[in-house]
Image: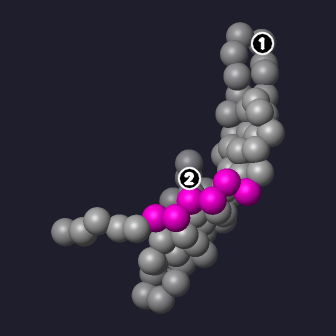
Amino acid sequence: MWGPAKIAIEIIDYERPRRLTESIRLSTMDIRGGLTFDLVPGGTLMRWSWEWMPRGVFKLMTPLVARLGRRR
């Protein structure tokens, strides 16, 4: 169905052990966001946040992707 894709990942910010921010570039979209880690009783709370910026035909999928993202 889909063939291999080139992906460029750039680490924008890294603050060990609390935060990782990156920029991801694909042929169909750019993605920017990251992960944060906070110590909580009994473990670690991981949060993630991403901003998807589709290009070309994939812009048409933006409402669907946004709806799926809110459900997660």
Which residue is painted at 77% across and 51% down in the image?
Answer: 13
Callout 2: 10 Å neighbours few (<14), some, many (20+)? few
Task: Determine which of the numbered discs, if any, sits on residue 71 in the image.
Answer: 2
Residue annotated with mark 1: 41
Residue 54 location, quadrant: bottom right
Q: Nearer the viewer, residue 59 or 33?
A: 33
Q: Is 10 included in the stretch rendered in magenta?
A: yes
Question: Against 68, is 53 above or below?
Answer: below
Q: Residue at x 70, y 22 (%)?
A: 44
Residue 70 seen in the figure: yes
Does 51 sit left or right of 2 as displayed?
A: right
In space, the residues marked 2 and 1 are separated at their CA atoms by 27 Å
For residue 66, say whether it is visible.
no
Residue at the extreme bottom: 56
Spot occupied by residue 40 in the image (x, y as percentages of width and height): 78, 19
> What is the quadrant of residue 41 in the picture?
top right
Amino acid type assigned to the residue bearing label 2 in the image: Arg
Helix, strand or loop for disc 1: loop
Question: On screen, 46 above or below 58?
Answer: above
Pick the quarter of the image with the N terminus: bottom left
**Which residue is at a point 48% across and 71% down the rendered structure image?**
26
